[in-house]
Amino acid sequence: MNPTSQTLQVGLAVDLPQGDCELIERLEPRVRVLRRPGLNRPARWNGDWEGDPGFERTAEQEAEFAELLAGADALFGIPDVDPALLARTIRANPGLRWVHTMAAGGGAQVRAAGLSQGELERVAFTTSAGVHGSTLAEFALFGVLAGAKDLRQLERDQAAKLWPAERRYMRHLDEMTVLVVGLGGIGAATAARFAACGSTVWGTSRSGRRVEHVDRVVPLEDLTKAAGEVDAIIVTLPGTPSTEKLIGADVFAAVKPGTILVNVGRGTVIDEEALLPALDDGRIGFAALDVFATEPLPASSPLWEHPRVLASPHTAALSRQEAGRIAKLFARNATRLLDGEPLINRVDTVEYY
């Protein structure tokens, strides 16, 4: 297809700062962002795409919001991050061509919308994968370092004002082999950081393609065997039916004592019931978890108080730069859409990742 001079009308389905709306229009002048202040749930912080849950539109505002979305060629965000509202909007707007989701794992939200095959073929869906790659990769590095340097024991010693009679050993990153489970954008960024620290980097891949900074690509069917040969396992996979509880009893039975586990993917990838006994007996010496199968993590979960667990409330991806980074990605994709080129991060509507 040839580039087009047509204008792309973009419905703002979530609260994006005015400056970032203007950034999109500046980077791609053929875009017009349809933004009406007061219609979106107000963000409580930068990157709060769900917005204030206490916000309610009046009947008039609800009608105006629906009218705005119905007149758009593309959506920046899923309306109110609500799959049901996404489905309703697609059915009310036969001219809608593209929806960009805020989450790297936005495919799960598309799946939850229960769209027909015809609707999935008519509308292109993209995610913000890659935008969060650097912050998540840094958390993965931090998590492995926290385990290697025994952060939890240091905290206990400091709280007790204890100077141990015998100094404790710490581990070297450049003596460790780390297994990155999932070599997508986050996994590739993670691999680069560990390679820079001198670690030997392995990674799982369904395609088997080579990835820069990865010393060995492991077929997914060899995951359990590989898990028994490494010092740390870093999960970056999205939550799909095929990845649910992928890191489970078989993997935990195979690992070497003291293996470090980090999860910056989705909580459903790890079987938490199988993880607990592995933590208790030291097969998993330390786990840094940013995501959990149920969120918020229930107060009754033993993971909160486990001495070998660092629990992060799904915040490793957040930064003050998130909205601007997503706006730039959206503008690049808008250019590609208007020029008839393939979109970046297009959702696979079979596996929904």
Image (tube, rainbow, N blue to C red):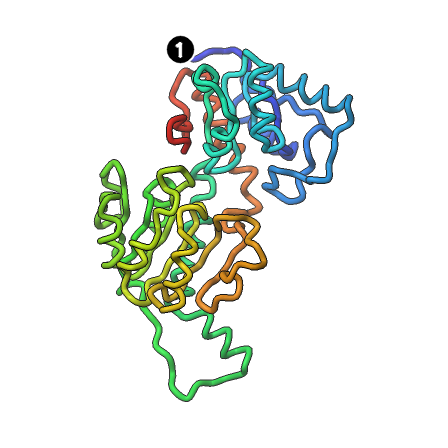
322 or 110: which is nearer to us? 110
Residue 87 sits above or below residue 320 on the image: above
Residue 83 sits above or below residue 287 on the image: above
Residue 100 sits above or below residue 242 on the image: above
Helix, strand or loop at label 1? It is: loop
From the viewer's perspective, is 11 left or right of 56?
A: left
Q: Position of residue 288 (x, y in %)?
A: 44, 59
Q: Residue at x 73, y 40 (%)?
A: 54
Q: Name the image quarter holding the C terminus.
A: top left
160 or 114: which is nearer to us? 114
The amino acid type found where label 1 is placed reads Asn
Residue linked to disc 1: 2
- Residue 124 in view here: yes
> How many other residues sit within 10 Å of disc 1, few (<14), some (14-19) or many (≥20)?
few
Q: Residue at x 45, y 54 (%)?
A: 139
- Residue 198 in view here: no
Q: Position of residue 252 (x, y in %)?
A: 32, 58
Q: Residue at x 38, y 11 (%)?
A: 1
Residue extending furthest bottom?
A: 165
- Asked where in the image residue 71 lies, by quadrant, the reply is top right
Q: Position of residue 326 (x, y in %)?
A: 52, 35
Q: Position of residue 309 (x, y in %)?
A: 46, 63
- Asked where in the image residue 250 lies, by quadrant, the reply is bottom left
Q: How many marks?
A: 1
108 or 74: which is nearer to us? 108
